[in-house]
Image: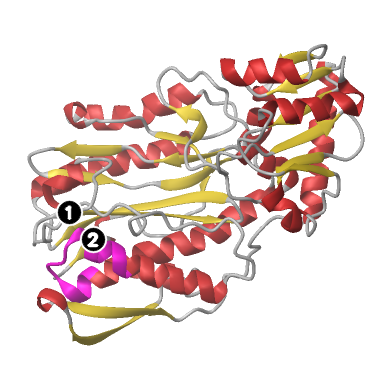
Amino acid sequence: MGQRREFLKTLGGAAAVTLTSSVPSFAGARALSLRATVAGADGPDRLPVEWYKKKIAQVQAELEKRKLDALLLLNATNVIYTTGYFHLTTERPLAALIPKSGEPALFIPELEVDQVKLWWVKDYESYFDYPGPVNRIRWIFERVAKRGLARGRIGIEEPTPGKLKQMKLGAPHARLVVADDLIEHLRWIKDEDEIAVMRRGMYFAEFGVQAGRDFVAQNGRVTEDQILKATADALADKLSRELRDVVGVAIEAPFGGLVPFGKRSAFPHAVPSKERLDKGDALILSYGAQVGGYCVECERSFSVGQPSDYARRLYEAMLAAFDEGTRAMKAGAIAAEVDRRALEQIRKAGLGAFLRHRTGHGIGLEGHESPWIAEGDMTVLREGMTFSCEPGVYDPNFGGFRHSDTVVVRKDGGESLNRYPTRLQEMIIEI
């Protein structure tokens, strides 16, 4: 238990959960109140305004290289990445214009006007609502054209045919150049400010795993939805209590996370059920957190009660692949080769028939984003890229095991942002 005790201590209390039972509730199950005793984990909840101003300058340097006069962003995640303007995405188009020099501008629906006044981007134009008398994409490009760009080279994100038609109607003499890879490739590399925000997110994600573990240990034969609700309640309380800025925080429906057990743990994306946990089951607790817009993952596999020899074989094969994948995520490696090296550990154990997916995926402002630690992706890894490392082994007649860490590519190997234990002896829950 030494590794787990060290985790509880060094993480600043993130997983030190106090559990108290209330009166019996539905179906005889105990309703638990989960309360965290927290000592710190003092990290940034979001990036500062100065970071976004530097990012705009970085984008403008790329525009100069490509001989573009401006870049028009309609993808909400890319608008947030470049300007820091967090907003709720709906059918109403919202765009950011980054000229080759000077300040960016926002084109927004009227319902954003009072909120945008609080942000650092002061140049904006607004339309009343959607759909409106004029197509709103056309409306945006008409205004872009009036800003000295009527005959300019404007970078755009890969549009649908319908959107491209409206862009051309709005700026018929401009040259529209598909340049969606510009922001995509900038997003691949996280600087230490971004990684600090991701560490903050991991503090909460690992709390979720520990809260789920403790709920199971206290309550025994629970259902998946009971684990999810108890954990989401605890995590929501913790986020509300500790965050100083709630921008970009998410707990996904129905209660966040994946918690399959028994044979259902062999479903990598199992939806919750009403089946009850039992001794001998494999259990996966899979949680993420999104703080300051940045996503992280923490997934851990457990054995409910002492594992059988067969369960140990599956678990150790998964763990070998997980360890190898993390080690191999170093600068200069090829993404597909990292995937091959990791999954080969499972194949060498004679369990290749139980592979269901790749080793990992890029992670950042989106939970899944490029590049991919998967066959076919020949991307050369660079320092600062961030990936999940999540190889799994899934026997449909028994269950599955999968850990997932959020890993930063470094010069000599991957740096995991996770602190939660991974060895089998630390992952046994007695009920």
Callout 1: SS: loop
Is residue 289 rendered to the left or right of residue 127? left
> Residue 326's spot in the image, x, y percent?
45, 40
- The amino acid type of the residue labelled 2 equals Asp
Q: Residue at x 59, y 51 (%)?
A: 293
Is residue 72 rendered to the left or right of residue 382? right
Q: Is residue 217 magenta?
A: yes
- The amino acid type of the residue labelled 1 equals Ser
| Residue 149, picture quadrant | top right
**Badge 1: residue crowd in 10 Å (few <14, some 14–19, many ≥20):** some
Is residue 252 rendered to the left or right of residue 103? left
Q: Image quadrant for the C terminus?
A: bottom left
Is residue 40 rendered to the left or right of residue 343? right
Residue for badge 2: 225
Give the vertical position of 375 relative to 319 (above or below). above
Distance, label 2 to label 1, CA atoms, is 7 Å
Q: Which mark is residue 273?
A: 1
Which stretch did the figure color magenta?
216-230
Is mark 2 in CB contact (under 8 Å) with mark 1? yes
Q: Residue at x 65, y 49 (%)?
A: 194
